[in-house]
Amino acid sequence: MKMAIVILAVLGALASGFLGMNWLNDLSALEGMSELERMAAKSMAAAQGQSLDKMGAAALVLVIGALVGLAAAFFAMKSRFALAGGMLLGAGLLPVFIQAQSVLFTALLIAAGGLAFLAHSRKGAVAS
């Protein structure tokens, strides 16, 4: 189970980092546009139910979450499952509260966090 947690955490971190960097690149492309083009892009995003401000905040949280996911994978390798589970669930759920579409890319982090807590509970049950 330990290797499954590590693999899911690393894959989730890669997916989270990819989405965060992709969104940051998309938002940086707005800097080169004229004011009229930026307003058109903001209105198109609003028509789709999105906010570019929320997207920017979520992108930063996704990139930081990718680093946290990698650190959690290290802790899972060291059998510190409770710490790894908390880190993974935090890195997986926080971007979802900001921008709901990110759940597709953070689902692996959430699954790894759940497995880490399951492994922690089994570790305690075996020790008793």
Image (spheres, grey):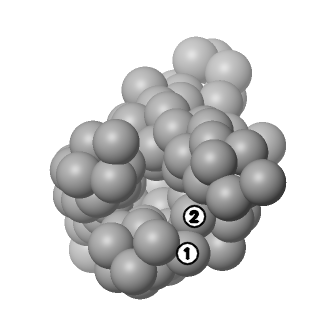
Q: Residue 57's x, y, as percent?
A: 64, 66
Residue closer to the observer: 104 or 35: 104
User: SS class of the residue under badge 2?
Assistant: helix
Image vertical order of residue 17 relative to residue 54, above or below: below
Residue closer to the observer: 97 or 9: 9
Q: CA distance from mark 1 to mark 2?
A: 4 Å
Please report the residue visible at 65 percent of the width from the left and 30 percent of the height from the top: 100
Give the residue type that dot 1 points to.
Arg
Q: Tell me if residue 21 can be seen.
A: yes
Q: Is residue 47 left or right of residue 7?
A: right
Q: Tell me if residue 29 can be seen.
A: no
Of all residues, the one furthest to the top in this rendering is: 48
Q: Residue 28's x, y, as percent?
A: 33, 72
Q: Residue 76's x, y, as percent?
A: 42, 68
Find disc 1 in the rendering and name its residue.
80
Residue closer to the observer: 84 or 58: 84
Please report the residue visible at 47 percent of the width from the left and 55 percent of the height from the top: 38
Find disc 2 in the rendering and name its residue.
81
Image vertical order of residue 52 relative to residue 66, above or below: above
Please report the residue visible at 33 percent of the width from the left and 73 percent of the height from the top: 77
User: SS class of the residue under badge 1?
Assistant: loop
Q: Quadrant of residue 125?
A: top right
Q: Quadrant of residue 34?
A: bottom left
Q: Is residue 31 left or right of residue 111?
A: left
Give the residue type that dot 2 points to.
Phe
In which quadrant of the rendered image does the C terminus lie? bottom right
Pointer 2 local density, CA inside 10 Å: few below 14, some 14–19, many at least 20: many
Q: Residue 11's x, y, as percent?
A: 22, 49
Q: Are marks 1 and 2 in contact (CB under 8 Å)?
A: yes
Please report the residue visible at 57 percent of the width from the left and 64 percent of the height from the top: 81
In which quadrant of the rendered image does the N terminus lie? top left
Q: Is residue 55 left or right of residue 25?
A: right
